[in-house]
Image (cartoon, rainbow, N blue to C red):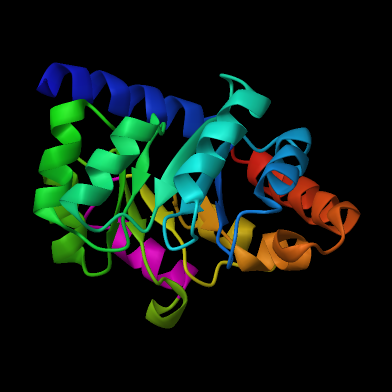
Amino acid sequence: MRATLKKQNIRFRERLAASRVITILRADDTDYFPDVAQVLYDSGIRVIETALTTPGALDAISVMQVELGPDTMVGAGAVRTLSDVDACVAAGVDFLATPVFSPEVLDRAQQYGLPVVCGAQTPTEIESAWRHGAAVVQVFPVAPLGGPDYIQAVRVPLPEIPLVPTGGVTLAEVESYLGAGAFAVAAGEPVIGDAISGGRLDELGKRASQLAALAGKFV
């Protein structure tokens, strides 16, 4: 199973390296998720995370997978428990994302060979998540820690670990994070805005295209 996980982790990193961006969908309901996801896809974004804190998230993921096709990876975020992992596997998600470092969640995901974007904050947590089989390590929340400066500082002793800052990442900071050595960036509300609740999709398209273009400089 570890060989399968290693292969899937490499595949996930390769797919993520092609865009350097994860976009995060989170709302009170999933009514507009498919429309938002289509705009993200049309803007060149191919990795989408849907938070389990949104009711109906797993059903929405299934819909988005069908509508967007196999060249998009749609995963579940805010995964915290073993039952979350099992439900995600049953729904056929492409990857998991956690807000914290949870060895038991990583262990369960490994049983299924499912890539995990594992949350961590301190260098100790980051190192532990990586050694425990995370595909990439999601540094969350990164803004209160110092933003790009924190990523750059952590990269010095841990240069081989692919870091994905999230939690307060704005469009204006994308180049700074990637320039500091981040493997990719994960962004939610600053990019998605009110489109997630029925706002203007054309404005979302402009922001998403800008995000893709900024990250594309580092592909």
Q: Which residue range is magenta in the image?
A: 147-161
Vertical side of 63 occupied by 182: above or below: below
Q: Quadrant of the N terminus?
A: top left
Residue 53 placed where, x, y %? 43, 63
Vertical side of 21 occupied by 24: above or below: below
Residue 213 placed where, x, y %? 74, 43
The picture quadrant where one finds residue 111 is top left
Q: Residue 96 or 158: which is nearer the viewer?
A: 96
Vertical side of 166 occupied by 127: above or below: above
Residue 76 is left or right of residue 5, and the answer is: right
Q: Quadrant of the C terminus?
A: top right
Q: Residue 98 or 164: which is nearer the viewer?
A: 98
Give the farthest residue toward the bottom: 144
Q: Residue at x 58, y 68 (%)?
A: 28
Q: Residue at x 44, y 71 (%)?
A: 149
Residue 83 is left or right of residue 72, and the answer is: left
Q: Let me know if residue 155 is in the magenta part.
A: yes
Whether residue 52 is visible to the viewer of this picture, yes or no, is yes
Whether residue 184 is visible to the viewer of this picture, yes or no, is no
Residue 29 placed where, x, y %? 59, 61
Q: Residue at x 20, y 64 (%)?
A: 123
Q: Residue 191 or 182: which is nearer the viewer?
A: 191
Q: Residue at x 27, y 31 (%)?
A: 114
